[in-house]
Amino acid sequence: MGSVRVHEVCLRDGLQNEQTLVSTADKARVLRQLIAAGCKDIEVTSFVRPRMIPQFADARDLMAMIPEADGVRFWVLVPNLKGLDRALDSFTKHIATFMSVSDAHNRRNVNRTVRESLVGVSRVLRDARLEGLGTRSYLSTAFGCPYEGFVSPQKTCELGLALLEAGAQTIALGDTTGMGTPAVVSDVLQAFFDAGVAPEQLAVHFHDTRGTALVNIHTSWSMGIRHFDGSVAGVGGCPYAHGAAGNACTQDAIHLFNSMGEEHGLSMEELCKAGEMLERFLGRELPGRYHRYWMGSRSTRVESARA
């Protein structure tokens, strides 16, 4: 296992904002390709209400299609206790919760105040831990809110500490609309470190809306973070935040880690094949920079082979 661990979210966060519904069979094909690429943490689906996000109406069916894969942790997102029950019925072993740091985004996302969400999420985490599940908790708008602007690092830290106390093993700090900059990222991470939280208890989830995902990943890495979320080909975004499309592209991050000599255990070629699959299933170009390079060079290779 390499020193950097990538949490692959293309099947969940990557697809949740897509209008094109990907078939369950095609999702399973991408899942198998991600395993072939060496992914050890894969967020497979979400047990939210299907009418809210139709892309995940097949959550139970997709979970039934997960192949045997030693050392791979398959994650699902759960919104509440009912979602946790559905996840348990599908034999889930690893769950993720979510809430926002800012009240404005949280209300638009789940129609609750931050305090109300904290109570609900804490119940989910406690029950999940009693069931022996692995747990991670997303804190959205950790580096800025599209409605409120500045988000206090101290508030983000206080919520993270409360979630750790409730049973979260990892706090995933989300840059929901790509507002984060190295200075902001440093301030947020330092707030956690000053409160006694170890780097291994934190993950970072960046969006590339403003082109800052890679520099924010590097800043986090330089401060000791080794757990990064990525989405193959840069697919995805938040359906409740306008303009948030473009998760940090997994291949872009791996290219960066390769240049730094960081071990990660992932095959770039196999990841690119997964990105090619996703682009075909969605019927549109995907934005990841390395993905676009791969697709272009692939076309060149094909033309050369035909000549």
Image (spheres, rainbow, N blue to C red):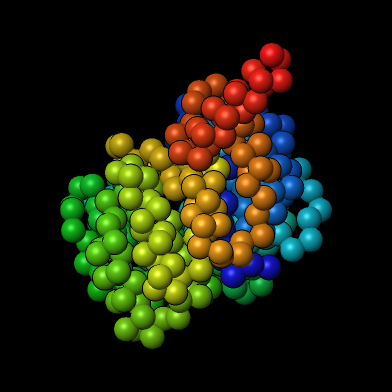
- x, y (%) of residue 182? 29, 61
Residue 163 visible in the current orientation: no
Which residue lies at the image location 53% right of the left edge and 51% below the top edge?
255
Q: Which residue extends farthest right?
A: 68
Instruction: Tell me the quadrant of the picture where the C terminus can be found.
Output: top right
Which residue lies at the image location 53% right of the left edge and 73% below the top edge?
169
**Looking at the image, residue 1 lies above or below residue 19:** below
Please give left or right for residue 186 compared with residue 39 in the image.
left
- x, y (%) of residue 80? 49, 56
Q: Quadrant of residue 188?
A: bottom left
- Of residue 258 and residue 25, the one placed in the foreground of this image is 258
Residue 255 visible in the current orientation: yes
Q: Quadrant of residue 118?
A: bottom left
Please give left or right for residue 113 compared with residue 279 in the image.
left
- Of residue 222 and residue 19, the one placed in the foreground of this image is 222
Instruction: Tell me the quadrant of the picture where the N terminus can be found.
Output: bottom right
**Looking at the image, residue 5 lies above or below residue 284:** below
**Looking at the image, residue 178 lies above or below residue 279:** below
- x, y (%) of residue 102? 26, 58
**Looking at the image, residue 246 lies above or below residue 154:** above
- x, y (%) of residue 142? 32, 60
- Of residue 21 and residue 270, the one placed in the foreground of this image is 270
